Amino acid sequence: MRVNTAHGKKIAKHTAKSFYIVTKSLFWFSIGGLFGLFLFVSFIFIYFQKKYNNVVYPGVMVNSISFEGKTKAEVYKFFEDKNTKIANTKFVFTSGDKSATIPASQLELGYNSQLLSEQAYTVGRSDNVFSNVTLVLQAYIKGLNLPSSYHYSQGKLKDALYPITKDLKIDPINALFTFQNGKVSAFRLSKEGQEPNLEALNNSISDKIASIISGEKAEVITIPIPIKKIEPDVTTENANQFGIKELIGTGTSFFQGSIPNRVYNVNLATSRVNGILVKPDEVFSFDKALGDVSEFTGYKQAYVIENGHTILGDGGGVCQVSTTFFRALLNAGLPIVERTAHAYRVGYYEQGSPPGIDATIYVPSVDLKFKNDTSNYILIQTEIDENQDKLTFFLYGTKDRRQITLTQPVITNQTPPPDTLYQDDPTLPKGTLKQVDFAASGANVVFTRYVVKDGKTIIADKFVSNYRPWQAVFLRGTKE
């Protein structure tokens, strides 16, 4: 069978021409339709522009509130009226026992009326026609909800809180640990500083603004002022190599009524033991640390107990220092190797303390000793408060979970002092009366200390003081 090729080509040519004509017609029809649609939309948009000239377009909302047909000024007034109500809300900022009440108006807290009125009005009024048409259609068909915008002055908040926050600012303290000539000549533990965390405070306020501005009535909102810790540049851990981290014990005594020479000796003896490091397992001797006590080493004469009498002697007042140190050792739970009570009750050591918690020394025969049974060095630090005539010992080291219990001293066998003794003294002018010894009641005093670590008693020691009754002695001048 033979195919008529010429006839086939004629049919194909006719088909192609028909397709071209149809396609061309559809193209121009589509162009015309689109142009017509454009003209229609343009007409509608122009109508909208004229109808809603100087007012907000339909479907435009702020925080789900419709502002269709409202002028920019009316939108502004709406939010300003809201701000008038919000202004009566009060914030109570607290820190410890201090507080500050600040109204929202002082913080300028409220809706950003100017911005919101501009945003609502300018929807569909940009320089981009296509964007305008799109936004207007979107707003009209399904609505266009703009988010709320509000503000408050962080600067006003900072100024209003300054009377409180100025006291919350504490600078950190760098550790200081200077070791010279076998002693720590300068020492200070590091300490964290602090300051009000204004960033966190601002976040707290911001979190509450949405509920405040949506409320129908004024509120009272309490917000604690958050505190931010400030680390020191030099911490205790990186300032020393002796494992000294914290305070492990203190001891205190008073010496009110002391004569100037005695006060001088207390200061001098205190300086001799200040800054000493006691290594682990070392038995510390107070006498050895103190050294010679005489006028050759700088001491002055004050009253001392010697051979059963109170006399003027070099270094009177040194026992004030040993007594205070003894109290620090007790409170730190450290083993007392050697301690001797005074021969009679001394008034200085019962200022703010019951009797029996004292320790006498007499270089080199009567000593006060303790053992460092911890795993780290112990640093001895002292402080004298001259306004209160107060001496304090601080023992620094590393706590090891030991718990200390001191029983109240039990006083028995109390006996009154002997009658006052008056002795003639030809070196004093006639008519002069000078007291050289002081009356004290006799007594036996006992107290016990228990030191427990990890549930086990590691120290249980009893301290006994047998005080003799002591006679007051006056010298009567007989010199003509």
Image (spheres, grey):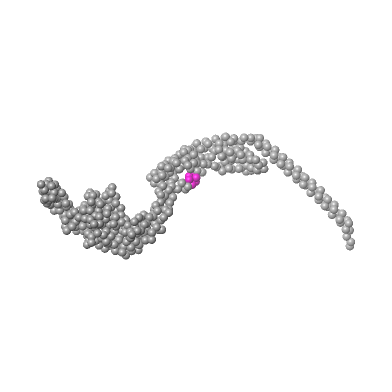
Q: Give the range drawn in magenta.
A: 202-208
Outermost bottom residue: 281
The majority secondary structure of the magenta stretch comes to helix
Q: Does the magenta stretch include residue 204?
A: yes
Q: Is residue 265 magenta?
A: no
**Whole-percent x and y of residue 261?**
23, 51
State whether residue 278 is above or below residue 152: below
**Whole-percent x and y of residue 205?**
48, 44
Classify residue 317 by image quadrant: bottom left
Instruction: Look at 75% across and 44% down and name the residue there.
Output: 31
Could you tell me which quadrant the N terminus lies in? bottom right
**Whole-percent x and y of residue 460?**
27, 62
Instruction: Look at 35% across and 55% down and name the residue there.
Output: 186
- Nearest the viewer among 21 and 460 is 460
Query: Looking at the image, can residue 421 be seen?
Result: yes
**Whole-percent x and y of residue 368?**
25, 60
Q: How many marks?
A: 0
